[in-house]
Image: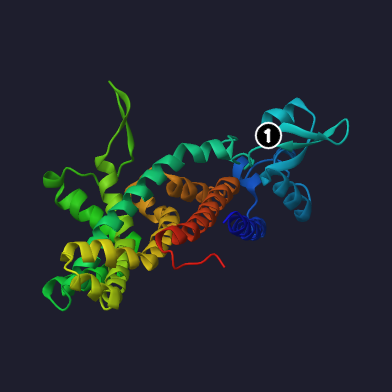
Amino acid sequence: MIRYILRKLGYGLAVMLGIVFVVFFLFNILPVDPARMTQGQRADVQSLQAVRKEFGLDKPIPVQFAYYLNDLSPIGIHARTVEEQQRYHYATLIPISSERVIALKWPYLRRSYQTRKDVASLLLGVIPNTLVLATTAMLFAIVIGVFLGVLSAVHQNTWIDRFSIAFSTLGISAPSFFAGIIIAWIFGFVLNKYTGLNMSGSLYSYDPFKGEVITWKNLILPMVTLGLRPLAIIVQLTRSAMLDVLDQDYIRTARAKGLNEQSVIYRHALKNALNPVITAIANWFASLLAGSFFVEYVFGYNGLGKATVDALEMSDFPVVMGSILFIAFIFVVINILVDVVYVWIDPRVKLS
């Protein structure tokens, strides 16, 4: 198992290196001058040169990429200066000269072009909001999706089955940004006096007497919108897998032994039908972090997606690149965890 996990970690590292390469060069070939964006169109040459030097934009692209990899790597080569220590917060591993050391540190995502603040700090301020949104949306999709899928398979060719199929088809067909606009308009505007929900708002709001408070009702509409498509996928996958499993010999044997129907369905059939559903859940959870970009923007929800879109509008590339790398990292970690969970869920799956 350890060798298997180490091999998967090696594959994940190779994927992350490829993503870093693509993301870095993609943003560096865009016809946008970050120095001009931060200083304005009337900035003088000296000011633009100073900004480019501050962010390392005056160096050739290959050199910039090498420095960027050194910043992202948890083990890098850094100068023995107070400025470097304050910037990277590194721990010295091996001194290689009187001026340089091999150091251990957290990946450094650099600073925002617009605010000059550390990108990691900016992202950590909004990532918890997005994680709460994605987690609640996924839980909503899993609970409702698995329930409807099992119900549809057990009552095949009835009105329950037809309703579940129609509902899942509608959910798959509706893009998140379109569904978000419709849901916000209906439940946040037309039916506002009945639902009490707002068309826009973030998880945290400011109260003049209590300070910053959690406003859970602002999570409901974005959660439903974000969870709608994975819910539809889970319904169809669960229904299809359950129909296959219910035709197996061991299910007929379990029924012949006199086990009650609920035990047959949930203890024997559902457990063995969960493999494709687990794959969908894992992939969709990571996808929800990326899909939240549109949903957060529609609902004005202050999370990773909204912060990234705002940064992209201002050509604040370090923030955009940092958020993309974070989402890619989540994808890699979740895929590794899913492969491990497979073995625990289904003993028929072999590591070889």
200 vs 71, nearest the viewer: 71
Specify whether 233 is left or right of 81: left
Q: Is residue 230 above or below residue 50?
A: below
Farthest residue to the right: give it.
97
Quadrant in which residue 168 is drawn: bottom left
Residue 136's place in the image compared with 81, above or below, is below
The x and y percentages for residue 47 are 71, 38
**Residue shown at 37% from the left, 44% from the top:** 132
Q: Which residue occupies 78% across, 48% down? A: 59
Q: Say if residue 124 shows up in the picture.
A: yes
Residue linked to disc 1: 88
Give coordinates of residue 259: x percent, y percent: 18, 65
Residue 333 vs 269, above or below: the answer is: above
Look at label 1 and name its amino acid: Tyr
Q: Residues within 10 Å of mark 1 (few under 14, many from 20)?
A: some
Q: Secondary structure at mark 1?
A: helix
